[in-house]
Image (spheres, grey):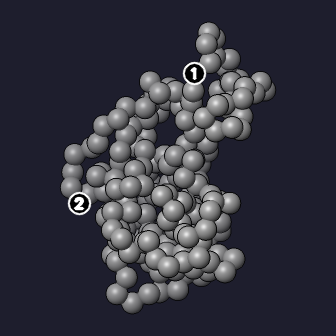
Amino acid sequence: MEFVESKSTGIFAIHRDLDGEIHSGEFQEREQFIGLIIGQEEFLLPISTVREIIMLSPITYVPNSPEFIDGVINLRGNILPVINMRKVMRIGRGTGEGSVRVIIARYEGITFGLLVDGITYVVSLLPQEIENQSLPGKGTGAEFIGSISKHGNKVAGILDLVRIIKAVAGDALDGDSEESSTSEH
């Protein structure tokens, strides 16, 4: 597989699709997303916001917490709120099967967990494969989709973390946790 240095990340960018197709002409900047399952649906999340993915660990219930927060977890000494994405997307209770994961995400200095039913794959999308449009529907979960991906025959909603954070707790996630005040890993 060929790799080309990416100026935007300082790391490496993939020059081929996962199926091996080489992109001809000038290299175009791609954005990477991780696929996640919520209920029976697949959504995408910008991989730039993902710090790590962990197995489901015990969640401590917090009385009077915001509607979408199931509680908190202790991740290597850091207490993080866990947002239940089934509740955010207005999908019924899950079965708690072995594929459930917690995505540790960080946005604007706020670190938190996103409880999802599973992880699928990483996809690298060209700008023309992302359509910046919201879906209609207040209170249905659709308001948390900031854009739509169209890669081949697949269409998936791309979750907007800013909208999720604002809906969950506004300023409540700015907490005094040590992790949110330190620099990134």
Of badges 1 and 2, nearer the viewer stands 1
| Cβ atoms at labels 1 and 2 below 8 Å apart | no
Residues 86 and 7: in front is 7
- Label 2, secondary structure: give it: loop
Picture layout, residue 68 above or below residue 41: below
What x and y, as percent, mark residue 163?
Answer: 34, 56
What x and y, as percent, mark residue 121?
Answer: 61, 44
What x and y, as percent, mark residue 49?
Answer: 54, 52
- Looking at the rendered structure, the kind of residue marked 2 is Gly
| Left or right of 164 on screen, residue 105 | right
Q: Residues within 10 Å of mark 1 (few under 14, many from 20)?
A: some
Indicate the quadrant containing the C terminus: top left, top right, bottom left or bottom right: bottom right
Query: Where on the picture, by quarter, is residue 183?
Result: bottom right
Residue at (30, 51) in percent of width and height: 142
Picture layout, residue 110 above or below residue 161: below
Residues 155 and 181: in front is 181
Picture layout, residue 6 above or below residue 67: above
Residues 44 and 179: in front is 179
Count of marks overlaid on the render: 2
Inter-mark Cα distance, 1 to 2: 37 Å
Residue at (69, 37) in percent of width and height: 10
The residue that label 1 is drawn on is 28
Q: Residues within 10 Å of mark 2 (few under 14, many from 20)?
A: few
- Label 1, secondary structure: give it: loop
Residue 139 is labelled as 2
